[in-house]
Amino acid sequence: MEEISNILLQELLLNLEEHKRLHIDVTEKMTKADNAKMYPLDLMGISIAKRSMSLIKGFVEMIKQENLICAIPLLRLQLDNSLRFYAAFLVENPHELASHFIEGEAIRRLTEKNTHKKLTDRLLVERLSEHYPWIVDVYEKTSGYIHLSDYHLFKTLNKVEPDKITAVIGDSDSYISIEEKIKTVNTMVKLTTIVLWLINSWALTKETPNIQDWKEKNGPGTGYKVI
């Protein structure tokens, strides 16, 4: 059974490696859309694609070295990629938001076009969870790894008995179950898929900006496309 689980883990890691190539494909699609015109949101998309690929590379290495203490925070950073880019889908002027990003300004000062609520992380998680409900749990759990918390304590304890606690001090997490490693890698695969989905959604919108043209070409849809 453990051998099968190890094979599954390796397959998931290979899947992540394949996702790095897909970043190149979708970014090329984005930059070539609309006769290769460049918009502020393209620059934001390019930076997110690059960051995502770098996160994947680091994440894979950390999993191979059995260092989940370093790997799990990278899940939170990958989710951050999606939250920041999805914010552009929620505002009146996405290129204005991208310009704020380019100038180093916090997008949380901007507001959602329908509710006029600030674009806080909590709001972005709530909105993106309408498509992916499971990201709420990922956001809450991975945020616990950014700052020192009880998560780090429990990842140090190997066994807890009524009158005995065994702690493991070292730079690897070899005692963590293969099932948890698989779950962690699978989460990164799913988060990376969201990043690619969002960049591709902008590429499609850029290519067919008129909503009526979009409907005639692709069927029902409003504003930025959810594909």
Image (tube, grey):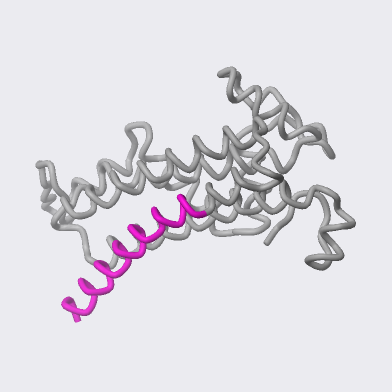
Give the residue at the far bottom of this rendering.
Answer: 1
Residue 100: horizontal and vertical position, in percent?
Answer: 65, 22
Residue 121: horizontal and vertical position, in percent?
Answer: 59, 36
Looking at the image, which is closer to me, 84 or 217? 217
Give the residue at the far front of this rendering.
Answer: 35
Q: Which corner quadrant holds the N terminus?
A: bottom left
Residue 89: horizontal and vertical position, in percent?
Answer: 71, 43
The overriding secondary structure of the stretch rendered in magenta is helix
* Residue 57 visible in the displayed image: yes
Q: Which corner quadrant holds the C terminus?
A: bottom right
Q: What residue sits 73% from the left and 55% below the top? A: 225
Q: What's the magenta region? A: 1-25
Q: Would residue 115 appear left or right of 46 to someone viewing this image?
A: right
Q: Would residue 172 appear left or right of 180 to someone viewing this image?
A: left
Task: Report the label total.
Answer: 0
Q: What residue sits 34% from the left and 36% below the top? A: 149
Q: Would residue 187 appear left or right of 158 to someone viewing this image?
A: right
